[in-house]
């Protein structure tokens, strides 16, 4: 059983535990982190979600993402998810924006990881990811505009990518 901390709309813990898979009460939010991986050569890492995932199976996403577990700090969760889903160990993550989706009982902290890793060193996480690829900025922009890509907020992601 995976537990998450409950938060209010101000992103403050409110002393409520959320059990993964159970309905979240109105007014209570849980936290998700996303990490966009940007290689020093100007390409972005895309991960393909496992076909057996309950939400958005088979779609591509930028980097790694996952829930913040009970007692975990956001940055620690981002580092953990990045390592679990890609094998990338990074200490240089930077918060780029937060998105609140009250109707989905969720807020998202979006981080970026700038790296200079061997591009063939990505390790897929069984049950989470099934493929990866490195794409140019233009390829990523085109994919974001398609139905084959998932992101909490495509327009915010596009804004961020445009300035790189």
Image (spheres, rainbow, N blue to C red):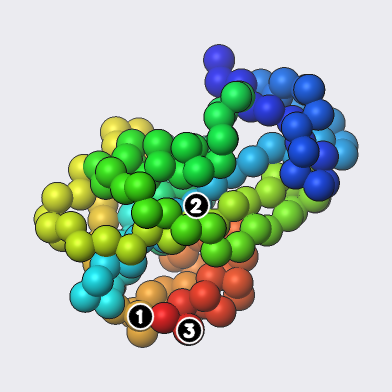
Query: Which of the two residues, 118 or 151, is positioned nearer the viewer here?
Result: 118
Query: Which of the two residues, 23 or 85, is positioned nearer the viewer here?
Result: 85
Label 3 near label 1: C-beta < 8 Å? no
- Residue 160 visible in the current orientation: yes
Residue under label 1, please give it: 137
The local secondary structure at tag 1 comes to: helix
Residue 34 has which mark? 2
Q: In screen coordinates, is 21 left or right of 16?
A: left
Q: CA distance from mark 2 to mark 3?
A: 18 Å
Residue depicted at x 62% and y 51%:
108
**Does label 2 or label 3 sit earlier along the sequence?**
2
**Does label 1 or label 3 sit earlier along the sequence?**
1
The local secondary structure at tag 2 comes to: strand
The quadrant holding residue 43 is bottom left
From the image, which quarter does the N terminus lie in? top right
Farthest-out residue, right: 27
Label 3 near label 2: C-beta < 8 Å? no
**Does label 1 or label 2 sit earlier along the sequence?**
2
In the depicted structure, whether residue 38 falls above or below residue 57:
below
The quadrant holding residue 28 is top right
- Residue 61 visible in the current orientation: no
In the depicted structure, whether residue 24 falls above or below residue 10:
above
In the depicted structure, whether residue 3 falls above or below residue 80:
above
Place of residue 148 in the rendered image (x, y in percent of width and height, measured from the top left): 44, 65
Residue under label 3, please give it: 162
Q: CA distance from mark 1 to mark 2?
A: 18 Å
Q: Residues within 10 Å of mark 3 (few under 14, many from 20)?
A: few
From the image, which quarter does the C terminus lie in? bottom left
Q: Residues within 10 Å of mark 2 (few under 14, many from 20)?
A: many
């Amino acid at each position: 059983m995976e537990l998450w901390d409950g938060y209010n709309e101000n992103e403050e813990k409110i002393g409520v535990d959320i059990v993964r898979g159970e309905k979240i009460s109105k007014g209570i939010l849980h936290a998700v982190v996303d990490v966009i991986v940007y290689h020093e050569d100007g390409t972005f890492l895309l991960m393909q979600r496992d076909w057996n995932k309950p939400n958005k199976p088979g779609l591509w996403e930028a980097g790694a993402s996952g829930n913040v577990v009970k007692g975990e700090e956001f940055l620690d969760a981002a580092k953990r998810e990045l390592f679990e889903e890609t094998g990338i160990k990074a200490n240089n993550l930077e918060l780029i924006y937060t998105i609140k989706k009250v109707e989905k009982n969720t807020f998202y902290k979006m981080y970026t990881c700038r790296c200079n890793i061997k591009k063939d060193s990505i390790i897929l996480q069984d049950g989470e990811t099934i493929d990866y690829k490195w794409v140019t900025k233009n390829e990523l922009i085109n994919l974001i505009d398609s139905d084959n890509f998932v992101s909490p907020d495509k327009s915010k992601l596009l804004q961020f990518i445009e300035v790189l």
